Image (cartoon, helix red, strand yellow):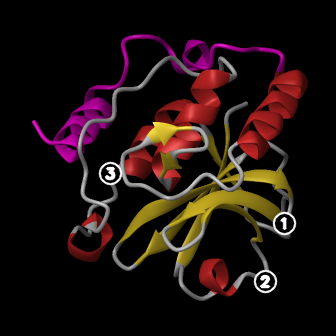
Amino acid sequence: MSAFAKLRRFSEDGPRIPMAERILRSDEQQARVDIVREAREWLNTPYHPHARLKGVGVDCLTLVVEVLERVGVIEHQEIGHYSPEGHLHQSEDLWKPVVELYAREMELPPARLPKPGDLVLYRVAKAFNHNAIVIEWPVVIHAHIDHGVLLADAERDPQLRFGCRERAVFSLW
């Protein structure tokens, strides 16, 4: 079964535990601090599709999953294989429904400023397929194919502002 099929099935079936219990940490403020600290430790990690090794390789999806797992916010997620270019051919949003199992979609800035540790999903081409973690709005950390893991200004960075057609912000709490 492909990774997209697994994600689709997971988002349709959902985990067998209530949403409130899917987030493993209830200490929101400290968890947010821990997410930001862990995310910063991944800075300058090269981009490598499917990789999950700090300092060696990571992509935008595995960065978010690894950070949330390492600070104990979510349980381990086996992602499986997926096409790094799937957004060019796939119009169905597969990642966003999975995020929605764990997090609530929030209003976009300026109505609500994202908090440290919130997630930002970006629509590139046909589907939501790029992810970032909020450090201190508008600063986010994400993995970019040409630059690896880096900090960016979500309001000014041309790749995030003009390369992405739409964005959505999610809070785990």
Kind of residue at disc 2: Arg
**Residue 80 included in the magenta stretch of the image:** no
Kind of residue at disc 3: Leu
Mark closer to the chain start, 1 or 3: 3
Q: Is mark 2 on a helix, strand or loop?
A: loop
Relative to 91, residue 64 above or below: above
CB under 8 Å between discs 2 and 3: no
Residue range highlighted in magenta = 1-27
Disc 3 target residue: 94
Q: Nearer the viewer, mark 2 or mark 3?
A: 2
Task: Assess disc 3: are there few (<14), some (14-19) or many (≥20) residues with their C-alpha within 10 Å of its C-alpha.
Answer: many
Task: Assess disc 2: are there few (<14), some (14-19) or many (≥20) residues with their C-alpha within 10 Å of its C-alpha.
Answer: few
Q: Residue 156 carries which label?
A: 2
| Residue 56: percent from left, percent from top | 53, 45
Relative to 150, residue 36 above or below: above
Mark closer to the chain start, 2 or 3: 3
| Residue 169: percent from left, percent from top | 66, 56
Q: How far apart are marks 2 and 3 (CA)?
A: 27 Å
Q: Which mark is residue 138?
A: 1
Q: Which residue is drawn at 81% across and 40% down?
A: 36
The quadrant of the picture occupied by the N terminus is: top left
Mark closer to the chain start, 2 or 1: 1
CB under 8 Å between discs 2 and 1: yes
